[in-house]
Amino acid sequence: METGRRARGTLEQEVVAALAAAQRPMTPAEVRDQLGGDLAYTTVMTVLARLSEKGLVTRKRVGRAYAYTAIRDEAEVTARQMQKLLDARDDRAAVLSRFVGTLTDEDERLLVDLLRHAEGDDQG
Amino acid sequence: MTLPLLITLSVMLTFALVGPLLARGLPPAIATRLLVPACLVVGASAVWALLTVGFTWVAQLGPVSRYGDWSPEQLRADTPFPTIIAVGCGLVAVGSVTQAGVVGTRRVRRMIAVRNACDQLGTPGSLVVLDNERPDAFATPGAGGRIVVTTGLLRALTAAERRALLAHEAAHLAHRHAWWLLATDVAAAANPLLRPTAAAIEHAVERWADEEAAKAVTDRRLVARTLARTALLTRASTVPATGLAASGGDVPCRVRALLAPPPRPRILPLTVVLALLITSAVAAATVQHRGDQLLDRAGAAPTSQPTTHHHHKR
């Protein structure tokens, strides 16, 4: 699969997302394997170093390499504000661009069908 | 004056009827960029024409006619609109402007509140990870908004799917979708007839972000799968009857569009929108021109009582 070139900020976000999804610290090699083989090891290293400088990830030495973890609880108060946004059912929620809307039962059936279709085609 | 008024209003009605079709017939980015201004122009033209008609009655009131230095009798004789029509038009126009103002103000205030809430969180445009099991993702308003994703969703998606999700949310920020939606909602508040079109535009905005994501990851099917899986995950974990915002659009429809080839611009819907826009603006301008002529004629007629001369400028 051709994956296209990423902008610098996009790659940083993908790395943070990968680290946050992982339940344990990851080495640069692991991060690179997750994000796809077209990335150079040095690119991943550079991004991780930059994120570490910005204080968005922490690192600790594991053997000869560093292992990185995404920082979770940077600002408790603001994080709580975001949680509130997540639960907002009023106008505040209306100004957020949510990735997906709510589904009806019919939507759910349709989606399961479409998904099966798409995945079947992928394998075929 | 009656004819251009009727033209303005029927263009508005036509637009309200065909708007949703036009939105679906155009590629989403073009649909948004074209139909949002169209909603505003068509809506504003109707309001402007109605205000002008309303003013033909207001201008007959004593203080107003004295200030404008025209004859209310002459005006009453010349105007094609019976009082009840003129008053009705004026009230509808004022109500519509008020409604737009109320909804617009409230929405902007919410946007500012959300913006302040994320001021200290990350940097503009950055990804904010929330430690929460419930799968959810959204972008906060503005070009400097944040992309917020829960750990629950990040863990459930593959690396490729996460990339598609981030690209979708980044497109919302990069193209300032919050502002397009604000304009749409204000237009729909001013004119409830435009609500179906506004809903179609909201859907187009989501589709726009989907198409941008498909371009970024060069894989439409991947974006389709990410959408479908996220929607199903979200549903599975959500307590029923949480009235989440309606934004996020019609997911099956978005998935189907992504499984089909990318949409291409078509000439017909483009022509229809442009024709409606021009007709609407010209007709509304004509209503105003005729209204001015009416006042000019009434101004030329001898006024019932001599007054000092004020030159009324409109």
Image (cartoon, grey):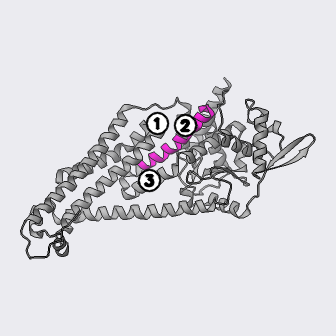
Q: Residues within 10 Å of mark 2 (few under 14, many from 20)?
A: many
Question: First in sequence: mark 2 or mark 3?
Answer: 3
- Tell whether label 2 touches label 1 (CB within 8 Å): yes
Q: Which residues are magenta?
A: B197-221
Give residue B183's mark: 3
Picture layout, residue B277 above or below residue A114: below
Image location (x, y in percent) of residue B284: 25, 52
Name which quarter of the figure residue B115 lies in: bottom right
Could you say which disc has been placed on residue B157 in the image? none
Disc 2 element: helix
Indicate which disc, 1 or 3, sits on the residue closer to the N terminus: 1
Dot 1 and dot 3 residues touching (CB under 8 Å): no
The amino acid beneath tag 1 is Pro
Chain letter for mark 1: B
The answer to if B208 sits in the magenta stretch is: yes
* Residue at left offset 65%, top offset 48%: B234
* Residue carrying label 1: B27
Give the prevailing secondary structure in the magenta stretch. Answer: helix
CA distance for labels 2 and 3 = 22 Å
Residue B193, percent from left and from top: 36, 53
